[in-house]
Image: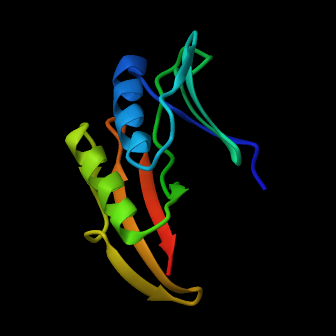
Amino acid sequence: MFSHIMIGTNDLPRAKAFYDKLLGAIGIAPSIVDNHRIFFMTPTGIFSVSLPINGEPATVGNGSTVGFAVASPEQADAWHAAGVAAGGTTCEDPPGVREGSVGKLYLAYLRDPDGNKLCALHRM
């Protein structure tokens, strides 16, 4: 459905260090730097972090979450631990199983150093 997702940062080197560790925990290769952006290329799409092109500060989208598909609850836990170790902060409930209208999901939430809300999701 999506070709790419891009979010903003106010500190590209910090974002690169954070996301390289976070996404490396789920097997994604380190980012490629292109001027004011970093790109993570996968067979299913691209995730990018950018300094705003208009020169204004990057801000967090209230109500926005970027979700990353993971292969297992253990991979979600490794993703979460890597994110916290790299400067992210836990948000929502601790990683674990949630039940809802779409069935059982294993979810792990955190915020990156800029405050963007992220989630690792495993469909059980």
Residue situated in front as seen by the camera: 34 or 30: 30
Position of residue 122 in the picture relative to residue 75 (left or right): right
Q: Name the residue rendered at 45%, 28% in the picture.
A: 9
Q: Is residue 59 above or below residue 80?
A: above
Q: Is residue 114 above or below residue 94?
A: above
Residue situated in front as seen by the camera: 79 or 116: 79
Which quadrant does the N terminus fall into? bottom right
Q: Would you identify the image quadrant in which residue 33 lies? A: top right
The spot of residue 37 in percent (x, y) is 56, 20
Q: Name the residue rendered at 50%, 81% in the picture.
A: 124
The spot of residue 61 in percent (x, y) is 51, 47
Q: Is residue 21 above or below residue 15?
A: below
Q: Name the residue rendered at 44%, 58% in the picture.
A: 119
Q: Would you identify the image quadrant in which residue 3 lies? A: top right
Q: Name the residue rendered at 38%, 18% in the picture.
A: 13
Position of residue 6 in the picture relative to residue 2 (left or right): left
